[in-house]
């Protein structure tokens, strides 16, 4: 699997597994091991195995932009999961220079009834056909093409596009619709809360495992052995976390003897905070 580039910056393929976890209150509630370098393709399998394990599904899933895709948004809706999943350029599109750039596709005027776009010079970009894009999972996305008619001699052409002929844009209307819903959720008060908590949840857990516990590489070979090794690391993390929580709930009893309060009852809200690093063998 492909890891993040090392100091050589040569993009070489490295043997590794893609580990995924779900957390709540920094407890690992579920994990899964994948033999793919792309996060996007792991979310559905991860949630399915979560459901097999607990015989129920999460009500809310929070994840970063690595999981944002048409396929995953459709999957979350089909499972009636409230997803707070970012997409590529979510943060970038919030910046003023992006919102005020008239040449960007997302800023072009679109006439939905007559199905055409308008370029910055006011020229219509008529519908030119449809196409299909397939993901590595075999998911098919339908895209539409729109073409300008007279880019030659346009004074804005150099800023608008670099193609030799007329400008052609590719639009996935369904994905744009799903992104709009995702944006509304992410920018709501609840969405801001989940977005602020996600790094504290999963990234802190992996930081503890990798830095504090020095678990930087898998020592086993083969998917079955790697699964067991990572499971033991997750159990160890949860036990350490649990013991610290128990110590915080102690009080003094008779003769200053330690008196433990009632054991903590873990009441999950069934919120998955998903994140992954690539852990090499």
Image (tube, grey):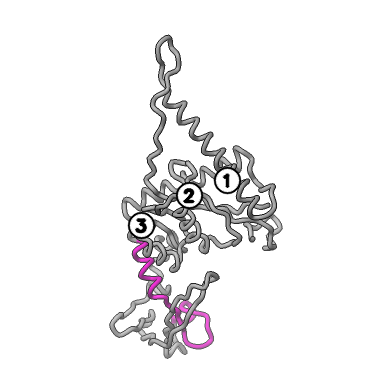
Q: What residue appears at the point 36 percent right and 51 percent down from the top-left corner?
A: 192
**Can residue 47 be found in the magenta stretch?**
no
Count the numbered circles shown: 3
* 53 versus 26 height, above or below: below
Marking on residue 231: 1
- SS for dot 2: strand
Whether residue 2 is visible to the viewer of this picture, yes or no, is: yes
Residue annotated with mark 2: 22
Q: What residue appears at the point 42 percent right and 19 percent down from the top-left corner?
A: 259
* 165 versus 101 height, above or below: below
Residue segment shown in magenta? 156-183
Q: Are marks 2 and 1 in contact (CB under 8 Å)?
A: no
Q: CA distance from mark 2 to mark 1?
A: 13 Å
- Residues 167 and 202: in front is 202
Residue 157: x, y in percent?
47, 82
Comparing labels 2 and 1, the label whose residue is closer to the camera: 1
- Residues 218 and 125: in front is 218
- SS for dot 3: strand
Count neighbours of disc 3 (C-alpha within 10 A) and say few if under 14, some if 14 to 19, many if 20 or more: some
Q: CA distance from mark 3 to mark 1?
A: 27 Å
- Residues 140 and 122: in front is 140
Comparing labels 3 and 1, the label whose residue is closer to the camera: 1
Whether residue 66 is visible to the viewer of this picture, yes or no, is: no
Among numbered discs 3 and 2, the one appearing first in the sequence: 2
Residue 268: x, y in percent?
39, 43
Q: CA distance from mark 3 to mark 2?
A: 15 Å
Q: What residue appears at the point 66 percent right and 48 percent down from the top-left corner?
A: 218
Left or right: 209, with 14 as reference point? left
**Can residue 163 be found in the magenta stretch?**
yes
Residue annotated with mark 3: 82
């Amino acid at each position: 699997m492909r890891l993040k580039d090392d100091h050589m910056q040569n993009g070489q393929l490295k043997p590794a597994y893609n580990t995924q976890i779900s957390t709540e209150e920094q407890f690992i509630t579920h994990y899964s091991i994948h033999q793919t370098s792309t996060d996007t393709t792991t979310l559905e399998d991860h949630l399915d195995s979560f459901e097999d394990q607990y015989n129920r599904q999460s009500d809310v899933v929070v994840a970063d932009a690595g999981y944002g895709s048409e396929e995953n948004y459709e999957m979350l809706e089909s499972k009636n999961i409230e997803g707070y999943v970012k997409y590529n350029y979510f943060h970038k599109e919030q910046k003023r220079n992006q919102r005020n750039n008239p040449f960007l596709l997302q800023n072009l005027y679109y006439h939905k009834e007559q199905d055409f776009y308008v370029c910055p010079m006011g020229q219509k970009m008529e519908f030119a056909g449809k196409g299909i894009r397939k993901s590595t999972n075999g998911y098919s996305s339908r895209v539409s093409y729109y073409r300008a008619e007279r880019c030659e001699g346009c004074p804005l052409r150099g800023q608008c596009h670099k193609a030799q002929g007329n400008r052609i844009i590719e639009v996935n209307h369904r994905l744009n619709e799903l992104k709009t819903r995702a944006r509304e959720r992410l920018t709501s008060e609840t969405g801001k809360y989940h977005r602020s908590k996600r790094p504290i949840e999963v990234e802190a857990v992996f930081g503890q495992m990798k830095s504090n516990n020095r678990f930087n590489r898998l020592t086993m070979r083969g998917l079955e052995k790697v699964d067991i090794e990572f499971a033991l690391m997750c159990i160890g993390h949860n036990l350490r976390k649990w013991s610290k929580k128990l110590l915080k709930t102690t009080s003094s009893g008779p003769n200053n003897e330690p008196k433990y309060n009632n054991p903590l009852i873990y009441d999950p809200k069934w919120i998955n905070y998903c994140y992954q690093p690539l852990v090499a063998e």
